[in-house]
Image: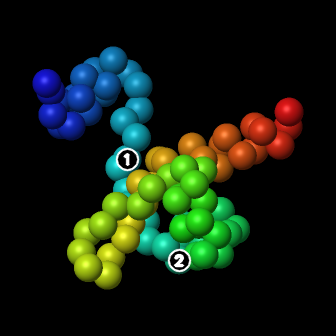
């Protein structure tokens, strides 16, 4: 299986942009989605919000792309 660098080179040669993988912390997640900490964790436990990853005992992060996708889905559902 190709690693991330191989995939990036393939995408560049194909002319498609490579999404930047970025980790974001809880304050930024809260700011971007407009939800409080308790609501985010409640929805995570219900499977209605992207799960966090743990980098250490007191360090939870989210993949920015997953948060962006969640925001996009909420916006789409609002239009339907």
Task: Decide if residue 63 is on the left or right side of residue 27.
Answer: left
Which quarter of the figure is the C terminus placed in?
top right
Dot 2 surroundings within 10 Å: few (below 14), some, or many (20 or more)?
few
Residue 5 percent coordinates (x, y) = 18, 37
Quarter-wise, where is residue 15 in the image?
top left
Question: Is any part of residue 18 visible from this angle?
Answer: yes
User: In this rendering, is residue 8 above or below 32?
Assistant: above
- The label shown at residue 11 is none
Question: Is any part of residue 31 visible from this angle?
Answer: no
User: What colour scheme does the image use?
Assistant: rainbow
Task: Decide if residue 41 is on the left or right side of residue 58.
Answer: right
Q: Number of callouts in the render?
A: 2
| Badge 1 element | loop
Quarter-wise, where is residue 61 in the image?
bottom left
What residue appears at the point 15 percent right and 34 percent down from the top-left corner?
Answer: 3
Task: Decide if residue 26 is on the left or right side of residue 32.
Answer: left
Q: Nearer the viewer, residue 36 or 66?
A: 36
Quarter-wise, where is residue 10 in the image?
top left
Foreground disc of the pair 1, 2: 2
Q: Which residue is mark 2?
A: 27
What residue appears at the point 24 percent right and 75 percent down from the top-left corner?
Answer: 56
State which tag comes first along the sequence, 1 or 2: 1
What residue appears at the point 83 percent right and 43 percent down from the top-left corner?
Answer: 78
Residue 22 percent coordinates (x, y) = 37, 56
Q: Residue furthest front?
A: 46
Task: Decide if residue 14 is on the left or right side of residue 7.
Answer: right
Q: Which residue is mark 1?
A: 20
What residue appears at the point 66 percent right and 43 percent down from the top-left corner?
Answer: 72
| Badge 2 element | helix
């Amino acid at each position: 299986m190709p690693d991330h660098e191989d995939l990036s080179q393939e995408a560049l040669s194909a002319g498609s942009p490579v999404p930047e993988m970025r980790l974001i912390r809880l304050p930024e997640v809260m700011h971007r989605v407009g939800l409080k900490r308790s609501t985010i964790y409640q929805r995570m436990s219900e499977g209605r919000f992207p799960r966090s990853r743990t980098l250490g005992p007191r360090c939870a992060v989210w993949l920015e792309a997953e948060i962006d996708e969640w925001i996009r889905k909420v916006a789409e559902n609002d239009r339907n």
